[in-house]
Image (cartoon, helix red, strand yellow):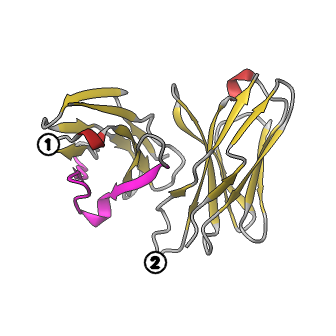
Amino acid sequence: KAGVTQTPRYLIKTRGQQVTLSCSPISGHRSVSWYQQTPGQGLQFLFEYFSETQRNKGNFPGRFSGRQFSNSRSEMNVSTLELGDSALYLCASSGTVVSGANVLTFGAGSRLTVL
Amino acid sequence: AQRVTQPEKLLSVFKGAPVELKCNYSYSGSPELFWYVQYSRQRLQLLLRHISRESIKGFTADLNKGETSFHLKKPFAQEEDSAMYYCAPSNRLAFGKGNQVVVIP
């Protein structure tokens, strides 16, 4: 089955702009988590969605938001971009108890560069 | 809250030498822990989980409740083990900061 798909793969924005990133989970997976990956901080949790509801939220400012649709696809939005938002944004989905509810399958990521 | 700590960021080892990546956790309740690996230009992927108690690519990790540790070990490092390794709890909220492993030929 298809893996986790993230779009776009690369994007360049300028300070003050906003960006929307998309994630399509593995078919049948209802949980989607988002992470920010940087060399200095490693993987930092942004938020998790399950059945269109935000289940957990990390310690990021309100400029970072997300949502999940009825088909489990998820988007995250960053408004008023800052230079420090430059990072690789990873999406991960997880499935049922049978397939390993706590095992994350990651997408390739969206590389955001803010100039 | 479930938390994990990976104390060393960069670990360089010679090919054939043992490698150990440390992960300590603070937990309430029964922990479920994972190691994820990210090879160069590849996706982050599951390496192993403690409940499976199996060896993957020669790596093992034993949950030590007394020391609250879940260290990843391999007796003989190979060049293809060069990667970024992350320890993570089941709640997926708090990955460790990761260990960059470089295996020197």
Element class at badge 1: loop
Query: Residue A93 at x, y = what percent?
Result: 58, 61
Q: Quadrant of the C terminus of chain A?
A: top right
Residue lying furthest front in this view? B105
Label 2 or label 1, whichever lies nearer to me, is 1
Could one spot residue A92 in this view of the protein? yes
For the record, the magenta segment spans B43-66
Q: Quadrant of the N terminus of chain A?
A: bottom right
Which quadrant would residue B80 be assigned to in this image?
top left
| Left or right: B45 as drawn, with respect to B23 | right
Element class at badge 2: loop
Amino acid at pointer 1: Phe
| Left or right: A54 as drawn, with respect to B83 | right
Q: Is residue A39 above or below residue B4?
A: above
Residue at mark 2 to residue at mark 1: CA–CA distance: 34 Å
* Residues indicated by labels 2 and 1 sit on the same polypeptide chain: no
Which quadrant would residue B104 be assigned to in this image?
top left
Query: Residue A66 at x, y = what percent?
Result: 76, 50
Query: Residue B85 at x, y = what percent?
Result: 38, 41
| Left or right: B29 as drawn, with respect to A20 | left
- Nearest to the observer: residue A80 or residue B12: B12
- Nearest to the observer: residue B51 or residue A34: A34
- Label 2, on which residue? A98
So how many labels did they put on this image? Answer: 2
Residue B19, label in figure: none
Does the magenta segment cover residue B61? yes
Query: Residue B86 at x, y = what percent?
Result: 41, 42
Could one spot residue B31 in this view of the protein? no
Amino acid at pointer 2: Val
- Label 1, on which residue? B76
Q: Residues within 10 Å of mark 2 (few under 14, many from 20)?
A: few
| Left or right: A34 as drawn, with respect to A80 | left
